[in-house]
Image (spheres, grey):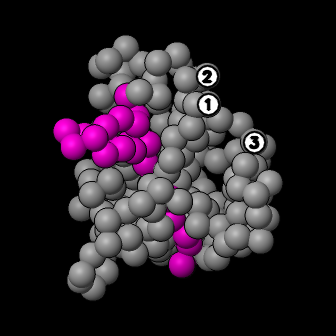
Amino acid sequence: MGQITAVSRSGEYTFTKPNEDVIRLVAGLGVEGDVHAGELVKHRSRVRRDPTQPNLRQVHLMHAELHDELTALGFPVTAGALGENVTTRGVDLLGLPTGTRLHLGAEAVVEVTGLRNPCPQIDGFSDGLLKHVVGRDAEGNVVRRAGIMSIVLVGGEVRPGDPIRVELPAAPHTPLQPV
């Protein structure tokens, strides 16, 4: 079982999201008070393309193990710094299949929709960081490591220290793709 190490939100389009003591997830919308909350897409580049798309990026989760790795490489990254809403530890987020349900704390449930597709803004946060969160494997396939995206199925309060329970979908499993 994993654990939530931090929760973050921002009411404005900022790259980094400040940490909070608690956030409230709202079913079908996302993080209450976060700029990316809503039934329809809120990411600015996606809104420009088609504002009627469903919002599959309501809650961004990132594993603290990535922060540890990046800090060891000389990129001091802390919870919320790369724009995530929920920072986790002890769950292989990138290895989860599409449709996995994550039970966060006592009530909230999110459904994993896909991978975050990191953008060049990451290098604006720290020059050279992008190549450490997106790269290629031995076969030349793109590997995205900047967390996962989800939608809120069941709302509730989420705070640091809360447990995370993983509920896998029925097989066969579909690997995560960028959303």
Residue projecting furthest to the front: 140
- Residue at horizontal 64 percent and vertical 47 percent from the top: 9
Q: Specify start and end residues of the magenta stretch as a single range.
A: 132-154
Does residue 132 appear to the left or right of 81 in the view shown? left
Residue 115 screen position, x and y as percent: 44, 55
Say above or below: 166 vs 132. Answer: below
Amino acid carrying label 2: it is Gly
Count residues near mark 2 (Cα–Cα under 10 Å), then give few for <14, some for 14-19, many for 20+: few
Circle 3 sits in a helix, a strand or a loop, which is it?
loop
C-alpha separation, residue under disc 2 versus residue under disc 1:
5 Å
Residue ID for mark 3: 13
Q: Are marks 2 and 1 in contact (CB under 8 Å)?
A: yes
Amino acid carrying label 1: it is Gln
Residue ID for mark 2: 124
Circle 2 sits in a helix, a strand or a loop, which is it?
helix
Residue 122 screen position, x and y as percent: 55, 29
| Residue 136 painted magenta | yes
